[in-house]
Image (cartoon, coloured by chain):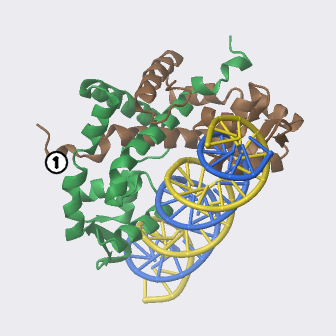
Chain colours: A brown, B green, C yellow, D blue
Amino acid sequence: MISDENLILEEQLSFIMYLCSKETIKRYKEYLDPLDLTYTQYLAMLVLWNGDKISVNDLSKRLYLDSGTLTPLLKKLEGKGLIERYRDRNDERVVLVNVAPKGFELKDKVKHIPEKILAETGIPASEATEILTTLKSVLERTSVDKLPFKK
Amino acid sequence: MISDENLILEEQLSFIMYLCSKETIKRYKEYLDPLDLTYTQYLAMLVLWNGDKISVNDLSKRLYLDSGTLTPLLKKLEGKGLIERYRDRNDERVVLVNVAPKGFELKDKVKHIPEKILAETGIPASEATEILTTLKSVLERTSVDKLPFKK
DNA sequence: TACAATTTAATTGTACACAATTTAATTATA
DNA sequence: TATAATTAAATTGTGTACAATTAAATTGTA
């Protein structure tokens, strides 16, 4: 039987997921601040480091972010000299992005952040992998749009 | 052996947690929009519904939000007539908050949202409980500040 | 008891996050 | 082929989220 009293903040899965995300991003902040990168900028760089040039549209699908978030974010990364932005010659609607030379230098500095944070928190890598699998499955079932994970 | 290629966006636990949180909040949005509540406002109301009056400071600890976020949010809830804000007579630094009559009416309308969303996503309640336990444990180990979960 | 230290909210400034709209370019079709 | 429909980014507006600072009230202590 579900009474009103079951509506307790700390028992809400959505709230705990929201806190896990926020607190983890705070952990990243400690490492990213000295590199003058925000967490979202770091995510964008992750995509760009591991690939060739990519359109804003494709990047938005990978990151689950729309152009309203990405456009200013990419302009900031461009302003720092980390990426290059330019219109696609074959389709002038499309804006392509790729890492600039200065952006490649950063990769080595962020490479070990995830391991460092896991170590800090004392979460064993094996457990992290398990949780990752679980949450990927949650995401698949929760995700609203037909994006990469939903496919 | 950890190569650069392990730095793949979709394999980052932090990113998947961030997506789970965002996508879940989008699910809530569908139910909260008609009630003119944002997700964060809903969280604040959850605390207020299940308790007496509370100070902004204590609320901030429950919600893991600082006054920079809470002050404008509470002013909005007050503007909608859902809560009352007033200075504590015994300590004028403290602002107390409680649900207004109009705010109580909303509780019945949000009560079943979490179950509805679970049903939509097809995640069984038993699995949700398991994931909740797992993520509470992650939060405890990740949380930076000495807040409720860290104790 | 004066005054320094602390506490509590509020304020300021930066950076998302996303819905809705707009603009420009491309594609589809009458 | 002219025009309607679609697509891609950018823009606009609202609402967090948080660090840093400020201002007012309270507490601690010399």
Residue B61 visible, this angle = yes
Image quadrant in which the C terminus of chain B is located: top left
Q: Position of residue A91 (x, y in %)?
A: 80, 38
Would you say B93 lies left or right of A61 here? left
Would you say B57 lies left or right of C27 here? left
Would you say A18 lies left or right of B42 here? right
Above or below for A107 versus B151: above
Q: Amino acid at mark 1?
A: Asp
Count of numbered circles on the image: 1
Q: Nearer the viewer, residue B141 or A75?
A: A75
The outermost residue toward the left is A1
Could you tell me which chain the residue with mark 1 belongs to?
Answer: A
Q: Position of residue B144 (x, y in %)?
A: 50, 42
x 49%, y 23%: residue: A132
Q: Nearer the viewer, residue B28 or A101?
A: B28
Q: Identify residue for label 1.
A: A4
Would you say A21 lies left or right of A1 here? right
Q: Nearer the viewer, residue D4 or A52?
A: D4
x 25%, y 46%: residue: A8
Q: Give the image quarter of residue B49.
A: bottom left
Q: Position of residue A54 (x, y in %)?
A: 75, 32
Mark 1: which secondary structure? helix
Image quadrant in which the N terminus of chain B is located: top right
x 16%, y 48%: residue: A4
Residue B52 visible, this angle = no
The outermost residue toward the top is B1
x 22%, y 48%: residue: B111
Q: Position of residue A12 (x, y in %)?
A: 31, 41
* Mark 1 surroundings within 10 Å by alpha-carbon count, few (fewer than 14), some (14 through 19), many (20 or more): few
